[in-house]
Image: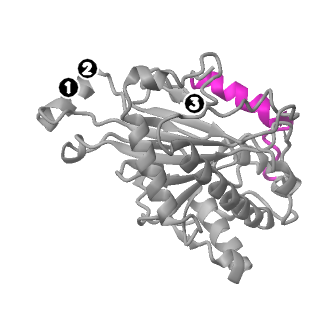
């Protein structure tokens, strides 16, 4: 098995493929083929029938809206200084995309895997921050568990697609430093402002700030829930930006840089962004919940032999642990 470039770039259309996750149970080979083709083409796929209940999605979204509606000083009580945003609250205007000088227009919450006291990875994975108000902690914890399980099913299929054992990732992500990020993109204009004039002022005064600047994800794969407002775009290989518009209730799943590195770019980590809304939607907030599935901190990212050939030599001859790679990237995006 060689990097996808050996087969030539497949023709691009204008929709990210949709794959039914029920195929994991009913026709695993079809699941493998569907995911592999979508990822090699776009680095993105949309998953339907994914098993995360609509009730849980709705509940977690409502709890998230309630949390971000709290006063700023109350939210800052849940901020952990000096932790690189690994847990708890990160305020508006902090995170900056790699290579960008302008911060994103968002605030967010991070929660990770719960570990017992004395666990070997407790230095890399600090305890979660518990929110006193409402059911935010319980609801988002349930989303973490559900998306972690869904991600493992996706990785099983990708292992087969890559020519390694189906269980290849099982003991490499079972204690992974994964993160559920709950994001609030506030409205860009107030109810009293003229939307077109206000958006023009944002472009001029803020010098090009956007909800999320063009970037690639750090981790293995990302599973995205929510996004009740549009704006997500991916960068096609032909240089054009393409809207990613999943049907309601679906999960968008994309490849991250760690998996791109592990597969010698056979599976591409596609650049994507969240653009500012149109004037008609500028008064509305946007909420989303990406789950960044990471390997265990001591996993060594060493290029898979099945993804190397004479034509496509190893781009990364020097292995690196996932934690070393993560720390390097967190510094680049101004979270450390």
Q: Is residue 327 magenta?
A: yes
What color scheme is it? one colour
Q: Position of residue 327 (x, y in %)?
A: 72, 26
Q: Is residue 288 left or right of residue 32?
A: left
User: Spatial distance from mark 2 to mark 3, Cα to Cα?
Assistant: 30 Å
Q: The magenta stretch spans which residues? A: 311-333
Estimate the x, y position of residue 163 in percent, counting from the top left: 83, 65
Magenta-drawn stretch contains 302:
no
Residue at 53% of width from left, 66% of height from top? Answer: 53
How far apart, in angstroms, are the residues tagged by discs 2 and 1? 6 Å
Please name whichever residue, 35 or 179, is drawn nearer the observer in this view of the structure.
179
Q: Residue furthest bottom?
A: 26
Report the residue marked by disc 3: 88
- Residues marked 2 and 3 touching at CB (< 8 Å): no
- In the rendered image, residue 169, in percent from the top left (x then y), is placed at 82, 55
- Rendering coords of residue 207 (x, y %): 32, 22
According to the picture, the residue beneath numbered tag 2 turns out to be 205
Report the quarter where the C terminus lies: top right
Label 2 environment density (alpha carbons within 10 Å; few <14, some 14–19, many ≥20): few
Label 3, secondary structure: give it.
strand
Toward which corner of the image does residue 165 lie, by quadrant?
Answer: bottom right
What numbered label is drawn on residue 304? none
């Amino acid at each position: 098995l060689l990097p996808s470039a050996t087969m030539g770039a497949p023709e691009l259309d204008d929709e990210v493929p949709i794959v039914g996750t029920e195929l994991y149970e009913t026709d695993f080979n079809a699941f493998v083929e569907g995911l592999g083709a979508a990822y090699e083409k776009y680095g993105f796929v949309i998953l339907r029938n994914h098993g995360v209940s609509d009730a849980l999605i709705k509940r977690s979204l409502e709890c998230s809206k309630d949390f971000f509606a709290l006063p700023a000083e109350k939210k800052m009580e849940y901020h952990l200084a000096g932790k690189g945003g690994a847990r708890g609250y990160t305020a508006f205007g902090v995170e900056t995309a790699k290579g960008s000088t302008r911060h994103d227009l968002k605030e967010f919450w991070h929660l990770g895997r719960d570990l017992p006291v004395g666990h070997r990875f407790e230095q890399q994975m600090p305890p979660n921050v518990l929110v006193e108000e409402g059911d935010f902690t319980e609801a988002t914890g349930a989303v973490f568990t559900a998306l972690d399980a869904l991600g493992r099913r996706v990785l099983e299929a990708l292992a087969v697609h890559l020519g390694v054992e189906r269980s290849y990732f099982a003991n490499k992500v079972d204690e992974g430093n994964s993160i559920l990020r709950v994001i609030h993109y506030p409205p860009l204009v107030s109810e009293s402002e003229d939307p077109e004039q206000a958006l023009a002022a944002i472009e001029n005064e803020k010098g090009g700030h956007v909800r999320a600047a063009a970037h690639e994800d750090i981790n293995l794969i990302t599973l995205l829930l929510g996004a009740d407002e549009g704006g997500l775009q991916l960068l096609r290989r032909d240089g054009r930006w393409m809207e990613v518009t999943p049907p309601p209730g679906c999960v968008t799943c994309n490849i991250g840089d760690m998996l791109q590195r592990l597969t010698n770019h056979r599976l591409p980590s596609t650049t994507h962004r969240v653009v500012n809304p149109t004037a008609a939607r500028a008064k509305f907030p946007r909420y989303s919940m990406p789950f960044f599935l990471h390997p265990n901190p001591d996993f060594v990212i060493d290029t898979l032999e099945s993804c190397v050939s004479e034509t496509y030599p190893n781009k990364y001859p020097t292995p690196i642990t996932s934690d070393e790679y993560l720390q390097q990237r967190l510094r680049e995006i101004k979270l450390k």
